[in-house]
Amino acid sequence: MKKVMTFTLLAVLSLPALAEKGGFEAGATPPPQKKQDAGYKGSEDTGQTHINQIRDFRQDGYVTLEGYILKKLQGDNYQFRDSTGTITIIAPEKTFDGKTYKADEQVRVSGRVHGKGEKTVLHVTQIDEP
């Protein structure tokens, strides 16, 4: 009886260790930068927002970008790139929703714009696949 109880207790306590945390996985090389809007290569008018446009947006404006998370900078800060440039995004662990993305996987990030010009950052509220 003790063996069964010990085994059951050990199994229950080890389950959280097996759960994946999600986030960003460095190591993969992102694809080359090229014209790509809303997931369609070569399309010109899809209404997609780009990094070069949000640098002049109003404070706390809500935007959605599609591109690649290139690398983790520090803490919750990541470098994000689309076809028009790069920007720092702030993405807390909860925004990854347990999923792990690599640098060569395109993602859609949504959040609020903070700052102006080169100091613009995006506070991400949601990350998903396009």
Image (cartoon, rainbow, N blue to C red):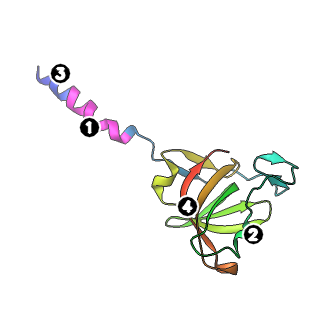
- Residue 73 percent location from the top left of the image: 58, 67
Give whichever of 68, 7 is nearer the camera: 68
State how far apart marks 2 and 4 are (Cα): 17 Å
51 relative to 40 in the view: left or right: left
Q: Residues at badges 1 and 2 in contact (C-beta under 8 Å)?
A: no
Q: Which residues are magenta?
A: 8-17
Q: Which residue is mark 3?
A: 4
- Residue 24 percent location from the top left of the image: 57, 53
Depth check, mark 2 against mark 4: the one in front is: 2
Whether residue 27 is visible here, answered yes or no, is: no
State how far apart marks 2 and 3 are (Cα): 62 Å
Q: Which residue is mark 1?
A: 13
At label 2, the amino acid type is Gln
Depth check, mark 4 against mark 1: the one in front is: 4
Of the two numbered discs 2 and 3 on the same chain, state the one appearing first in sequence: 3
Quarter of the rendering occupied by the C terminus? top right
Of the two numbered discs 4 and 1 on the same chain, state the one appearing first in sequence: 1
* Residue 109 numbered tag: none
Q: Which residue is mark 4?
A: 124
Local packing at callout 4 (Cα closer than 10 Å; few below 14, some 14-19, many 20+) is many
- Disc 2 on helix, strand or loop? helix
- Residue lying at the far left of the rendered structure: 1
Of the two numbered discs 2 and 4 on the same chain, state the one appearing first in sequence: 2
- Disc 4 on helix, strand or loop? strand
